[in-house]
Image (cartoon, helix red, strand yellow):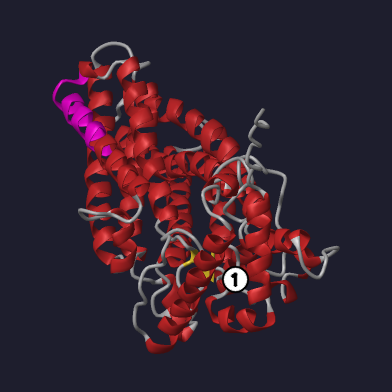
Amino acid sequence: MDFPSWDLVATLGGGVLVGVVAILHVLVSHFAIGGGLAIAVIETLSVRRGDGALRELAKRSSKILILVSTVFGAISGVGIWVTIGLVAPAATSALIHTFVWAWAIEWAFFLLEIVTALAYFATWDRVSKRTHLVLIWLYAFSAFMSLVVIQGILSFMLTPGRWLATYSVVDGFFNPTFLPGLVYRTGICLLLAGAYLTFAALREKGAARARLVRLLAGFEAGGALLAYAGYRWWETALPGQVKELFAGAQPLLATLHTTRSVSLRALAFVLVVAVASLLVPRVKSTPVAVVVLLAAFLSFGSAERLREGARKPFVIRDYMFSNGILVTEVPKLNSAGILARARWAARETEASGKSRGEAVYRAECSACHTLDGYQSIRAVTGAMDRDMLTSFLDESRKDGEAWRARLVRGAAPPNPGYPSMAPFVGTDGERDALAAFLVSLQPSPAKEPNAR
């Protein structure tokens, strides 16, 4: 709440922008991890067997790794930091301060990853085979360790676990979904490695092509099975209230339920084609490889959307709501007012009226809603009059108090009335001002023509 909102993406919404940048990044970064391991295995086999076709596959694959991961992956990674810093500065600050040494370790591994990748690509046929293998295995190790550190932080945002009581970085890092998520992501890394590098294998001519395709299909199939096992384990590790959002006969958020189905079905499709390619390598033509890669993207991207959506109405579960308000701040802000904290939103506003309501909207609602674009607040409240809005905000405020009570009692409160919406926090005057502003967004009723 100490940071102003970013209105540059007024139509798209900041959350969508972060999601687009993040998903594009993970589709490449996870290949960078799995691809490094796959190339290390391929070159090791080529040295032990004296297999020239495997060596050429590793060489062609290293070019893909450098161009896709080191260039696009690094740039999009910076893009994530820029966008989350602008869209969710309070959450970004909390993650940096909580895991400052974990970030330092991750950046050290990332630096080793970049240096070894460049050295590996630049030293083909220039150093001994043993030295070259050391470089690629160092790359694979550093890339995987980067994943381990990032997974601890990402899973913390959904399941902080005992950290809520201890504030111990160890409890926060080794949270309930850390290991399940790591297994899932490792499987995705192997799956993407096989899907990406198949294009390099398809360039091979002659009899060697079939065994190269079969080798990479093995990465796809093994990765898909490991990812499925990790996903199922991840679901069992989730708190009941989180699973209610997307699982079961009557999920609270139907869109997340659909997202889950899409992810699992796309993963099953990749597995089926991978097994078919193991049995009959000629099944894997270039068009089929493209479809498999897109299906892998769809499965992983959907899973990432599910994980992000399952945090709602929090950005850090049970700690910080999506708009940056801490659960522990709710009683104080209900008494002192949200604008007493979000002074950037209260500037140049009147003591009451529409401008004050707009300031409350900017402080509490603009993190998730736009006026007329994604999750349009005008569309959400279009059928509600002022009394209905006031009543709804009162009920929502009770939800905020319930989450606060949960931390005190250690018991789970009822789900909020709207599962993905952060509760209203503020005084009665701010509630009334917000309701007045939201009503003002609605179109005026058309006047009937004068009777003659």
Nearest the viewer among 187 and 446 is 446
Residue at the spot x=38%, y=88% of the render? Answer: 409
Which of the 4 image quarters holds residue 54?
A: top left
* 274 within the magenta span: yes
Direction front: furthest residue:
452
Q: Which residues are magenta?
A: 267-281
Vertical comparison of 422 with 227: above or below: below
Which residue lies under the disc numbered 1?
325
The residue carrying pointer 1 sits among few (fewer than 14), some (14 to 19) or many (20 or more) residues within 10 Å by Cα, namely many
- The quadrant of the image that shows the C terminus is top right
Most prominent secondary structure in the magenta stretch?
helix
Instruction: Decide which of 376, 198 is in the foreground and name it.
Output: 376
Looking at this view, is 358 or 133 the one in front?
Answer: 358
Could you tell me if residue 115 is visible in this image? Answer: no
Position in image of residue 105 (x %, y %): 55, 65
Task: Name the residue: 72% across, 72% down.
Answer: 339
Residue pushed farthest top?
206
State the residue at coordinates (61%, 45%): 13
Please identify the residue farthest to the right as the structure is shown.
Answer: 348
How many circles with numbers are drawn on the protein? 1
Question: Along the horizontal axis of the image, is 182 left or right of 408?
Answer: left
The percent position of residue 347, horizontal first and vertical second, equals 83, 65
Q: Is residue 159 above or below residue 80?
A: below
Q: Is residue 432 magenta?
A: no
Task: Determine the image quadrant of residue 1.
Answer: bottom right
Locate residue 336, reporting x and y percent: 68, 82
Whether 253 is drawn above or below 347: the answer is above
Q: Position of residue 228 (x, y in %)?
A: 24, 48
Residue 229 visible in the picture: yes
Q: Secondary structure at mark 1?
A: loop
Residue 434: quadrant of the picture = bottom right
Q: Amino acid at mark 1?
A: Ile
